[in-house]
Amino acid sequence: MKKLLFLLFIGISSYGFGQQLVYTPKNPAFGGDPFNYTWLLNSANAQNQFEDSQLEGFEGLEGFDSLLNNQLFGQFGDQELPPEGTSRDGNLEYEVFESTEGLVINILDITTGEQTQIIVPNN
């Protein structure tokens, strides 16, 4: 009887201390809590030792405007906007025309085939 009572006590007490282990990921991309996203992103940015050298001196839309004026419009001399028609400068070919949306500038890099379209809206 004492042995049975002892075994029953051991069985019940060991059952009370045991628990099921469940893995829950931290990263929201793998099923974790979505509220962890901000914490993970801030932690990664704090540990980032690299800097993007292409964005130096680039401050919002004002920086984009000056960058665009310097790189694109500066190639056409003292004119504020490029002349209408098709022109070529080095590896870049420009096509400029008026549309209902405004002045459209298509830029084609002849060597890579990359195309860019800039639309300057009507005032």
Image (cartoon, helix red, strand yellow):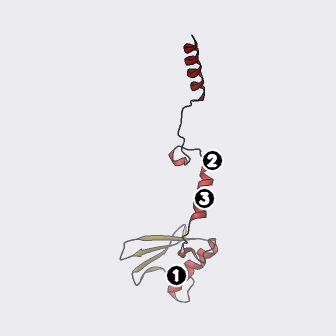
**In this rendering, position of residue 109 left or right of residue 44:** left
Q: CA distance from mark 3 to mark 2?
A: 14 Å
Figure quadrant of the C terminus: bottom right
Disc number lying in front (1 or 3): 3
Rendering coords of residue 114 (x, y %)? 40, 71
Disc 3 versus disc 2: nearer the observer: 3
The answer to the question of whether label 1 and label 2 lie on touching residues, with beta carbons closer than 8 A, is no
Q: Is residue 77 visible?
A: yes
Report which residue position mark 2 lands on.
Answer: 35
Instruction: Name the disc covering residue 71, or none.
Output: 1
Mark 2, secondary structure of its residue: loop
Answer with mark 1 or mark 2, whichever residue precedes in sequence. 2
The residue under the point 55% across, 69% down is: 49
Circle 2: residue type:
Phe
What is the secondary structure assignment of the residue under circle 1? helix
Q: Are marks 3 and 2 in contact (CB under 8 Å)?
A: no
32 or 65: which is nearer to us?
32
Residue closest to the far bottom = 78
Q: Can residue 123 be seen?
A: no
